[in-house]
Image (tube, rainbow, N blue to C red):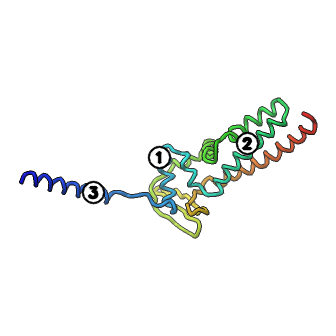
Amino acid sequence: MERRRIVVGALVAAVVVTALALHFHQPFPPDGTPEGAYARIAKAIAEQRERDVFPYLEQDAQDAAFSIRDMRRAACDAIDKSYPAGAERDALLAEYGPDATTKDGPDEFLLLASRHHFLARLRADLSGIANVERSGERATITTAHGTRYSFRRRPNGMWGLTLFTAEMLADSERAARDLAGVKAAAADYARAGR
């Protein structure tokens, strides 16, 4: 009888613990929702995995990161091949080198984030979601502290944060102009025989 009472007590305790766990367990919303993208960004920042923010940027921002890296790499290659040794060459390689040597888009994003203080802006308020406004392919999340984060649906169905897109596109356009100038100067140096 005593043994049966212990077994029943253990079963009741297991049922209560399971019920409480199920009641309080709040799974992440799917990343195919603005709420899911925001939750994953907040989690990545909280766990100091800043590189993991990149998949939750909008498509234009992601493309800009890869473009900046590729254009800076092309500029450095042209400078290495055609520019004469000297202060101009050294200064340009020092300026473009960090972007040229990033491994991929997420690493380029981290470099840009450091330059433009992107992550500090995010850390300022990643509180809970107070409201979500959707309008077609766009959504705005308002946090409990009143900060508004805009998202846009990407072609793959995931939602991407738009907060840094303008600056990343401006950096990409600057890299394209710089590359054009470097190529023109490299052609001049090549014609002049260095």
Q: Which residue is drawn at 59% across and 67% down?
A: 137
- Please rate how many residues cluster around mark 2, counting C-alpha atoms within 10 Å: few if below 14, some from 14 to 19, many from 20: many
The residues tagged by marks 2 and 1 sit, at their Cα atoms, a distance apart of 32 Å
Residue where numbered disc 1 is placed: 46
Mark found first going from the N terminus, 3 or 2: 3
Residue where numbered disc 3 is placed: 18
- Please rate how many residues cluster around mark 3, counting C-alpha atoms within 10 Å: few if below 14, some from 14 to 19, many from 20: few
Residue where numbered disc 2 is placed: 73
Quarter of the view holding residue 80: top right
Q: Which amino acid does label 3 sit on?
A: Thr
Quarter of the view holding residue 8: bottom left
Is 78 left or right of 123, judged from the image as shown?
right
Instruction: Please provide percent x and percent y for residue 22.
Output: 31, 59
Q: What residue type is labelled 2?
A: Arg
The residues tagged by marks 3 and 1 sit, at their Cα atoms, a distance apart of 28 Å
Instruction: Please provide percent x and percent y for residue 6.
Output: 12, 52
Q: What residue type is labelled 1?
A: Ala
